[in-house]
Amino acid sequence: MIRSALIYARYSSALQNAASIDDQVRLCRERLDQDHIKVRDVFIDRAISGSSLHARAGIQALLEEVARGDVDIVIAEALDRLSRDQEDIARIYKRLSFAQVTLVTLAEGEINELHIGLKGTMNALFLKDLASKTRRGQRGRVEAGKIPGGKSYGYRLVPTLNANGTVNRGEREVIEDEARIIKRIFKDYAEGKTARQIAADLNEEGVASPRGGVWNASTINGNKKRRNGILHNELYLGNIVYNRQSFVRDPETGKRRSRPNPETLWVTKHVPHLQIIEQEIWDKAHSIKAKYASKCGNKRQTRKRLLTGLVKCGCCGGSMTIIGRERYACSSRKEQGTCNNATSIKAQDLEQRVFDGLQSILLGREETVKAFADAFNDEVKRCQTNNASNMSAVQKDLLKVETGIKRCVDLLLHSDTPMESIRSTLEELETQKRALTREQALQKQQGKVVLHPNIGALYARKVSDLKGLLQNDGTKHQATEIVRSLIEKIDVAPTGQRGKSDVVLHGALANILAYATANTKEDTSPTNVGRVLLVAGVGLDFGRTFFE
């Protein structure tokens, strides 16, 4: 029986270079050639840490290929190429064992439970030791007056050469233009201006923010616990503060999470040549912050609303966020001062307009329900027709491949043709057959969709139950995601009348609502598809329907 293998290779940008991938694959191929084992595929992860499986598409694709079957061996240069995490390496080995696939590495040979236990522990200890050495190196740089992290607003990187020829990237120098902005921010704040007012002034004058865009109040205020933001950056006092936070990897998502460290673990080094703000103005600004800051903080967990993140300002296009716990207002006007849209709208009223639109149009007309049922049934029939056509094509291709396989077998049994060339063709045909067989099974599964006997009544019931589903703890999450997936955005713009606003719905839901009123007078030109004006009290105003 011809055996097949999958090769896996990985390199970490912190430890190796890109050429390592080619070296790993070449050595694995040489080993397989010696054992006369066919290479079926190669899976690669480039410049990705081995501490987690979640971010590595290559290893995930390899495991999916193993689950499909027809694989005998997975080979890698060493066990730490697959993973350095004890839990992950055990999980990989468990999945390969279940699929009856042998795991082999060039360094350890055929892997068994003993390797998993011992090498997994050693790799985990290596990561812990590496993190410890990295922190020790960073601590040494801080003690030498160097900055171990990225650059802050107000400073530029000054690379220098060490005595051994290596590049030192911890040196910084003050950028005078940005330093003047920092001094201005502290002075304005100490004199009573709020962070929002300061951000608005800077934006009005066209001053670029630290990231090159517009200023926000949060850019200036930052976070007290994490000591970020302009007003909390102690480097402006001439102090390098190290070890304020540590990072841990979430075992569920594989993502790094930051955690503030207690102040007793912080390391501070004074660097006078980097000081921008005098202690007196720093103390004055922070006394004002302390005066208005809550001692206990805001512990309230706010509820994610149905339309959170979807409501946009009809004037500037920026996001509208909740103010006063119940109203949507333009965040660009509030945080940056770059918009003059003073319109706000109650979140409850906005959500009600959406529900009124759904119920009055989707359920208010018998022809709408019938149109949906007809469209649904037509789509099912179309899918069935396409599926039947695809099934026929797959069956035709499968028949050709099986005929080719039979001919190859006949040649092997009754011909003088060199067996090696026949075997190569046979292997290729067998691979095609497996792919076509999988596609055929998938087509059969997709072909099981049937017409619902009373789709109109089902449709009406589901729409009527939607609001209840959104309020039910067991179903609200899924129902919310379904409704949100139908909405691209909702624009809120002033009408010129006090307390009133135009609300324009964009996206798939707008298309559905527009389709439901196809008999009304509308502009249906190709350039005008996909937005509907929602009007308070009556749901949708199709005398004023907009399209985009």
Image (spheres, helix red, strand yellow):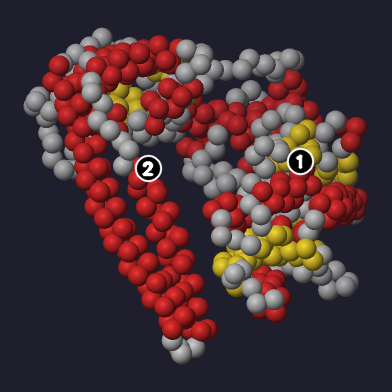
The answer to whether 210 is drawn above or below residue 219 in the figure is below
The answer to whether 297 is drawn above or below residue 402 in the figure is above
Between disc 2 and disc 1, the foreground one is 2
Residue 105 sits in quarter: bottom right
Q: Secondary structure at mark 2?
A: helix
Q: Secondary structure at mark 1?
A: strand
* 440 relative position to 425: left or right: left
Quarter the N terminus occupies: bottom right
Whole-Å distance between the Cαs marked 2 and 1? 45 Å
Quarter the C terminus occupies: top left
Task: Point out residue 72 in the picture as x, y percentages from the top left corner.
Answer: 63, 62
Q: Find the residue positioned furthest to the top.
A: 537
Viewer-side residue, 31 vs 54: 31
Task: Point out residue 518 in the picture as x, y percentages from the top left corner.
Answer: 12, 28
Q: Residues within 10 Å of mark 2 (few under 14, many from 20)?
A: few
* Residue named by callout 2: 445
Q: Residues within 10 Å of mark 1 (few under 14, many from 20)?
A: few
Viewer-side residue, 308 vs 420: 420
Residue at 42%, 15% (x, y): give it: 469
Viewer-side residue, 424 vs 497: 424
* Residue named by callout 1: 247
Q: Give the mark count.
A: 2
The answer to whether 376 is drawn above or below residue 55 in the figure is above
Mark 2 or mark 1: name the one nearer the start of the chain.
Answer: 1
Label 1 is placed on what type of residue? Phe
Residue at 37%, 42% (x, y): give it: 445
Label 2 is placed on what type of residue? Gln
Task: Point out residue 113 in the picture as x, y percentages from the top left corner.
Answer: 81, 51
Please say if the residues under marks 2 and 1 sit with CB atoms less than 8 Å apart: no
One can see residue 47 in this view: no
Viewer-side residue, 471 vs 490: 471
* 515 relative position to 63: left or right: left
